[in-house]
Amino acid sequence: MRPLTEEETKNFFEKLTKYIGDNVKLLLDRSDGLYCFRLHRDRVYYCKEEIMKKAAHFPRKELISFGTCFGKFSKTKKFRLNVTALDFLAPYAKHKIWVKPSAEQQFLYGHHVMKSGLGRITDDTTQYQGVVVYSMSDVPLGFGASAKSTAECRHADPMSIVAFHQADIGEYLRSEANLI
C-alpha cells in the first residue's frame, strides 16, 4: 500500500472529474475525518487515514483490501472505475440520466441506454460526458458516458443509444469474484 505517484494521481483525478467535476475535493475534505486514496495491487482504495494506518501493520502479501475500492489501473496505466465507487460518485454527480422502469433491467444486464428508455437527462450534458444513471425513483444504478448531448437527445430516434454502459449494480452478482 502506497500513495499514488504524480502520474497515477493525474489519471485518477481526471477520471473522477469526468463524473463529479470539482466535487473531488469534497471526497477528501470531509467533516467526519481525514480521508485518503492509496494504491495496493494496482487498485485505488478510499479510506479514513486511521484505517489506512492500521492496515499498514499487515504484510502486503496478506492484505487483501481496505476501505472502498474505487477502481484499478490497467497495464497501460489507464484508470478504470469500478461499480464499488458508485456510492461516492452518485451524491456529487454533475450530469445524470434517469431511465424508465421498463429500461432498468436492460441497463442492469449491461446494455446501453436507448432513447426509448430515457426518462430524463440533466441539462447541458455534452457528448461523451461522464454520467450517473438513476432509476426514476432516484436510486443510482450505475454510470457511463453520454453518447449524445441533451439537445441531440430531444430529436433522436427512439432506438438510438443515449448513454454508453460502463458499470452497473448488477455487476455485484455477475462479476462477484473480480470486485475485491
Image (cartoon, helix red, strand yellow):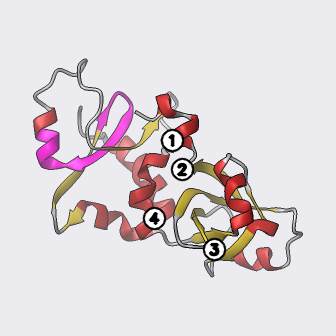
Relative to the observer, which residue lies in front, 104 or 93? 104
Is the Cβ of the residue at disc 2 closer than 8 Å to that at disc 1? yes
Q: Is residue 50 magenta?
A: yes
Structural distance between the alpha carbons of marks 3 and 1: 28 Å
Which residue is disc 2 drawn over?
A: 169
* Stretch of the chain drawn in magenta: 39-53
Image quadrant in which the C terminus is located:
top left
- Going by the numbered disc 1, the residue's amino acid type is Tyr
Which residue is disc 4 drawn over?
A: 90
- Let me know if residue 147 appears in the view: no
User: Between disc 3 and disc 1, whose residue precedes?
Assistant: 3
Is the Cβ of the residue at disc 4 closer than 8 Å to that at disc 3? no
- Going by the numbered disc 3, the residue's amino acid type is Thr
Q: Nearer the viewer, mark 2 or mark 3?
A: 2
Is the Cβ of the residue at disc 2 closer than 8 Å to that at disc 4? no
Structural distance between the alpha carbons of marks 2 and 1: 6 Å
Horizontal and vertical percent position of residue 32: 16, 64
User: Between disc 2 and disc 3, whose residue precedes?
Assistant: 3
Query: Mark 1 falls on what kind of element?
Result: helix
Structural distance between the alpha carbons of marks 2 and 4: 12 Å
Which residue is disc 1 drawn over?
A: 172
Number of residues whose C-alpha sits closer than 10 Å to that of mark 3, classed few (under 14), some (14–19) or many (20 or more)? many
Residue at (30%, 39%) from the top-left corner?
Answer: 5
Horizontal and vertical percent position of residue 145: 63, 58
Query: Mark 2 falls on what kind of element?
Result: loop
Q: Nearer the viewer, mark 4 or mark 1?
A: 1
